[in-house]
Image (spheres, rainbow, N blue to C red):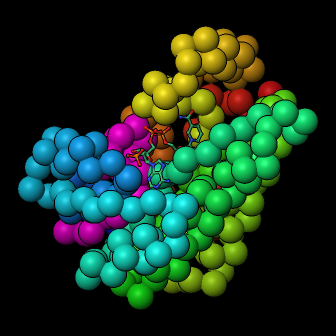
C-alpha cells in the first residue's frame, strides 16, 4: 500500500468539515498538507491546529484564474482531494437559474480545473479523490441539478482514471454528513434533512466527518483502486 509519509496532500476545502478531518488523518500519518479555501481566518485557524506540516492559500473553485494561481505556487502534488464547493439546490419550478447552475459551476468545473492545474506537478504514484455525493445515485426530490452534478462527477472520475493513469482517480460519494456545512443553513432545514435521512438510510443516522475521512484515506493509499466510486452513506443509495 502507498504510505502518506513524506507526501504532499492538497485539500481544497480543507479548512473545515470533511476536508479538515482528512487533513488531520494525513498529517498524523506524516504527510504535509496544503489547504485551500476562500476565508483566510478559517484557513489560518486550521493551519494553527495542524502545526508545521500544514500550509494554506486562498482559492475559489468558482474562479478558474484563482485555481490556476493556487497551483502555480506549489512544487509538487502527491494527492489531491477537492471537497471545497459552494452551491444551492431547490425544486425546478422555484429555483433561480443562477442557483440551479451553481453545483456544476463550483463542484463539477471547480474539481475539473483543480485536476487540470494540479497535473503538471503531480507525482506518478499520486491520486485524485473527487468529491461526489450519494444524491447522484439516489436523488432528493428538490435538487435535480445537484443530483445530476454528483452523477457527472462519478463519470468525470472514471474518465480521468483512464486519461491520467498511472495517477489513480476515484470518487467518494457520501450520504448526509454531520459537517460544518449544516451550520450554514437554518436549524429547521437541518432538522428536516436529518430526520428524512434517518428514515431512508439502512444505518439510521447521518455520517461523521471521521467516517468519510477514513474512506478518502483508503482511496489515497490503496494502490489497486482506481476509477472507483465509494458510497460511505449508511446504505442510503441502496434502499
Ligand atoms: N455534509 C454533507 O451532508 C455532504 C454530503 C455529501 C457530499 N458533501 C460534499 O462535501 C463538500 C462539503 O464539505 P463539508 O460537508 O465538510 O462542508 P464544509 O465544512 O462547509 O466544508 C466546505 C469547505 O469548502 C470551502 N469552500 C466552500 N466553497 C468554496 C469555494 N467556492 N472555493 C473554495 N473552497 C470553498 C469552505 O471554506 P470557505 O467557505 O472558507 O471557502 C469549507 O472549508 C461538498 O462538496 C459537498 O457537496 C457533503
- Asked whether, in this view, residue 138 is left or right of residue 213, the answer is right
What percent of the width, then of the height, locates residue 171? 59, 57
Task: Identify which residue, 58 or 218, lies in the foreground.
Answer: 58
Outermost residue on the bottom side: it is 120
What percent of the width, then of the height, locates residue 175? 62, 34
**Residue 191 to residue 230: above or below:** above
- Asked whether, in this view, residue 158 is left or right of residue 41, the answer is right
**Residue 165 to residue 62: above or below:** below
Q: Is residue 190 visible?
A: yes
Residue visible at 39% across and 62% down?
59
Q: Is residue 97 magenta?
A: no
The quadrant in which the C terminus is found is: top right
The quadrant in which the N terminus is found is: bottom left
What percent of the width, then of the height, locates residue 18? 42, 41
Q: Quadrant of residue 213?
A: top left
Q: Is residue 13 magenta?
A: yes
What percent of the width, then of the height, locates residue 142? 81, 32
Residue visible at 28% across and 42% down?
42
Region rendered in magenta:
6-24
Amino acid at each position: 500500500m502507498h504510505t502518506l509519509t513524506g507526501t504532499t496532500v492538497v485539500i481544497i476545502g480543507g479548512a473545515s468539515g470533511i476536508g479538515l478531518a482528512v487533513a488531520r488523518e494525513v498529517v498524523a500519518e506524516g504527510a504535509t498538507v496544503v489547504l485551500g479555501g476562500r476565508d483566510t481566518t478559517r484557513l489560518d485557524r486550521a493551519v494553527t491546529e495542524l502545526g508545521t506540516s500544514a500550509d494554506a492559500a486562498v482559492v475559489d473553485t468558482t474562479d478558474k484564474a484563482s485555481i490556476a494561481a493556487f497551483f502555480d505556487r506549489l512544487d509538487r502534488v502527491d494527492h489531491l482531494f477537492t471537497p471545497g464547493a459552494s452551491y444551492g439546490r431547490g425544486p425546478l419550478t422555484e429555483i433561480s437559474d443562477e442557483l440551479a447552475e451553481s453545483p456544476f459551476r463550483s463542484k463539477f468545473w471547480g474539481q475539473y480545473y483543480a485536476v487540470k492545474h494540479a497535473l503538471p506537478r503531480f507525482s506518478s504514484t499520486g491520486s485524485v479523490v473527487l468529491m461526489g455525493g450519494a444524491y447522484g445515485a439516489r436523488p432528493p426530490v428538490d435538487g435535480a441539478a445537484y443530483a445530476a452534478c454528483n452523477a457527472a462527477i462519478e463519470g468525470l472520475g472514471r474518465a480521468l482514471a483512464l486519461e491520467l493513469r498511472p495517477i489513480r482517480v476515484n470518487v467518494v460519494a457520501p450520504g448526509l454528513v454531520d459537517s460544518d456545512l449544516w451550520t450554514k443553513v437554518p436549524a429547521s432545514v437541518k432538522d428536516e434533512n436529518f430526520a428524512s435521512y434517518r428514515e431512508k438510510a439502512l444505518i439510521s443516522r447521518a455520517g461523521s466527518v471521521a467516517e468519510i475521512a477514513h474512506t478518502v484515506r483508503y482511496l489515497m493509499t490503496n494502490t489497486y483502486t482506481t476509477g472507483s466510486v465509494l458510497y460511505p452513506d449508511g446504505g442510503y443509495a441502496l434502499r
